[in-house]
Image (cartoon, coloured by chain):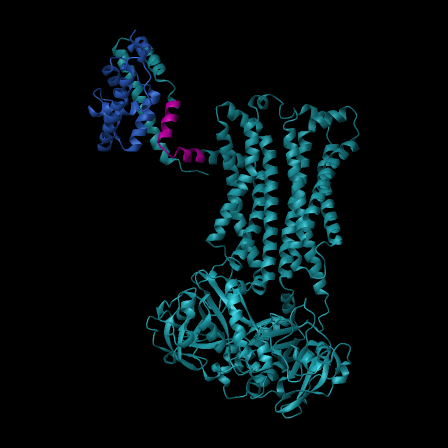
Chain colours: A cyan, B blue
Amino acid sequence: MRLPRIRFAKQRDELSEELRAHLRMAIADRMERGETEDEARRNAMRAMGSIPMIEDVTREMWGGVWLERVLQDVRYGLRQLRRAPGFAVTVVVTLALGLGAAVAMYTVVDRVLLRPLPYRDAGSLVQITEVDKNGERGWGNAFSDIAEWQARSHTLASIAFDDVEGGPGHLDFLEGKEGSIGVAHATVSANLFSTLGVDAAMGRTFLEGENGAARQEDAHTILLSDAIWRNAFGADQQILGRTVKVSREAFTVIGVMPRGFVFPFGLEHPMVWVPMIPGSTDKTRVKNVTPSYETIARLAPGANVAAATSEIKGIQRDVAAQYTDQDYRDHVRSVRIDRYGDTLVGDSVRKSLLALGGASAVLWLIACVNVTSLLLARATARQREIAVRGALGAGRGRIVQQLLIEGLMLSSAASVMGIALAMLTLRAFEHGLRAQFGIYTVLTPNVRVLGVLLLLTVISALASSVWPAIAAARAPIERALRQGAAQSGTGRTQHRLRAVLVVAEIAMSLTLLVACGLLLRTIYTLRHVPLGFRTDHVVVASMTIPNYRYVGRDLNKNLYAPLLERVQHLPGVESASMMTEVPLGKTFGMVFSFGSDGKSAADIRRSKIRAQARAVTPEMQKVFHFQMLKGRFFNEGDTATSLPVVVVNREFIREYEGEGSDPGKLLGTPLLSFNKKQAVIVGVLNDERQNSITEPSQPELEVCLPQIAPGNAFYWATGMAMDIAVRTERNPASVVPELRDLMRKASPELANSTFTTMEQVVEDSYGSQQLASRLLEIFGGTALVLCIAGIYGLLAYLVTQRTRELGIRIALGAQRTRLTALVLRQAGGMLMAGLAAGLLLAYATSRLVSTLLYGVKPHDPWTMAATTLILLAGGLAAACIPARRAAGVDPMVALRSE
Amino acid sequence: MTKSDAYKNRIELVQGTLDMLLLRTLQWGPQHGYGMVQALRVHSGEVLQVETGSLYPALHRLERQGWVRSEWKQTESRQRAKYYRITAAGKKQLSRDLGRWQQMVDAVAAIMQREPEGSDA
């Protein structure tokens, strides 16, 4: 490789010429004074001194010499590395593995934990939530309550509120220039934008009326996100004042928000915002009538979360007293205030990310240690070369600089490769990242990540090459130059140092392996949790429901029933059913509770039930094959005109009737009012996992979808979310195109539905464990390989260094088996020390992954023992090759070799 | 021989005075390095012999500071040589150096000419 030398070349040539001219003039002068040409030349040169030295000193005046020297070192380093390609490749790959892991994890951490919110001074934004006396959140916050906080609070500068209809998964359809696109819409107070400190990029935001709500004149206006403005309207500059249709309703565009603005934070879909204008129900405090809102508030200057919490709690006592409904009042007893940023990332996500980040950092450290060890070995091998440079006048500083630059070159090459590895890793884990951390875009390292990479690269270079460089530069020149000196016990301390490095490497690898083992056991346990239903050969489609097309029409009769009928007749479909949410779906949670009217112990117990409610079609049992404990599941006979029926699960009975009650006893009991009649329990399901595999069964109540018509209390829910689950005879994925086609024909918006398999749903519900265990498998595996390579590298090197000594021993009659034992003993010593330290380290750190574990304790002795054995076996296997080579040394060859 | 005489009488230049002397030399007109050495030697009565090893680093330093500029020209004996010329900034620098130098000389002189106190009595 050619590096730029042009800049200095011209200047240098000029300097030489200048000095030559000087010399010529001096000679000419002397000859004029009568000296012969020879004499004159000799005297002039003597008077002038060493020309190369003058050039050197003069060049230093130019500035930028350091750069020239660096380039010189780079060229020299490249030559050295080209001469040892195996070494260079090993170092680069090792470091790249460490850097790649660290960068990949940091990219995720950066995105999930460190991502700045697109609001002004986001640190002082908080969320207020009304809670019951146990701290459980209620139904959201009523407008009247928010108004009261606004009026009386001094610690909060402003309180804004919003309502995202149907939850984050629910879509509306906006008619743009090229067809309709799915959008999420939020109803927001007018003071939201001033509270967040963000103004419209174009046009204006809503006009503020009483209590921060929007004014009546802004009714039917809309704010577009930058993405919608660009994608659906081609960045039309004339957009302001135009009418756009969202789910058939007409709105006037009054503004476009700046690029990157999103609220609520983390929604994946393009957004629109409509004004919240208080309606008549907003003045009430009546259960199931009063609308509820999420809040976001800004702390007043100087106020903190604790002060705000105690202030609003005080106000809330008066607020709660104004509720006439006892049950409703219980749910608004108190408030909780969290920083807005904290509400976005769950505690378990934070912990698992930090654990994984820590694991990747350990892997990086192992890589650095390994490279340090390699560089030490190389410095020993290069001792003579370095001594020659020293003898020729290179200062120690210069030698250290040169070796550091070599290290930096290696780690720069590694960082390029590392970033490629990181991107591959992120791509490979795209699905897991989306399911666990809600990352919907493809992650690419940003400027901050590149900054961290640069830092890590420099640290890697320094950490791995400073030590070897200093050791090499300090070595006495004269001894290294003497013949055969390299053989005569060079740097006993250096060998010990390398042994210590290998021990550290073993210890760190064991820590990673233990964490990996714990997660593998967790995954194993999770896979063997009885789910209560079958998951094979089931395709799931989460529908994006075009409710607006069915305003005033029965969704059930006009869309769902005919669609289901057609899906059931698709070739290869065994059975198909619809339900508001498939088990473990995490798409739409509906909670059913009884009013607390009575005062008896049973009434109070029943009022505490929070049952998972679902509307399902009778075919569900054919799709999922779950067990009925008592009674029957819904069937074709359950229609809109027949007797309303419900099915509950065993846990429901347990909470409804108390512990130890007979599940069959309640069959035929009327449970709730339904279509103005009493719905009776006709069946009891066995327990199953509904929300998460790690969560035990919750009480559950199912109603029959065909029995639900407009006007029914469950009807609204069927328009919010609906899944189709299809049991197939063939490979489930192969049904998806036909299914999608069928759905598109039923209504074009349905083509936007998400398709997955039940197995994937289950896989995703393993939670962060799945992702964590996969990542840790990679980290642990890499650590194991690096560690074995480290052990092998050191022993092989030692055997080579001691070839002559071993040869002499054999010549003097030493048994070859004893030489093998000699090497193995050395390996054993390092392994024992490393494993002992590693077990201590693992014992201390495995608690960090405890949030990820299920069914296994952080200090599980079996895992510790198994991983220790694996590492021990690997280490001894690595030692075998050098050990055999030691035994195979030919004394004649060994003695002749020097 | 002149050469050994010159060496016998040579005095070390005080730190920083070389720059001043070189700038001063260039005030008499553009000159190349060898010419400056000769000029300093002649005008100092054969006392100052500037080493080549100090001269060129100093000239290149002055050039980097912008106090002198250089160009290649023919000498009277029709040889190519690099001529240095003082710049406006260089002249300003020279007068600053000169002022400081004068102060220094006065200060040193004041101390050296003062009679020892004990001899008054």
Q: Is residue A295 left or right of residue A208?
A: right
> Image point 46% across, 71% down: which residue?
A152
> Image point 68% across, 68% down: which residue?
A695
Residue A111 counted in the magenta span: no
Q: Residue A833, relative to residue A870: is it above or below?
A: above
Residue range (magenta): A53-71
Please tell me in which quadrant of the rendered image residue A786 appears. top right
Q: Is residue A704 left or right of residue A397?
A: right
Residue A59 counted in the magenta span: yes
- Report the residue that reaches farthest toward the bottom: A641
Image location (x, y in percent) of residue A166: 53, 76
Q: Residue A316, relative to residue A560: is it above or below?
A: above
Q: Nearer the viewer, residue A806 or A497?
A: A497
Q: Residue A557, relative to residue A788: is it above or below?
A: below
Image location (x, y in percent) of residue A526: 70, 64
Q: Is residue A489 left or right of residue A296?
A: right
Q: Nearer the viewer, residue A548 or A567?
A: A548
Image location (x, y in percent) of residue A867: 72, 50
Image location (x, y in percent) of residue A57: 38, 26
- Report the residue that reaches farthest toward the top: B1
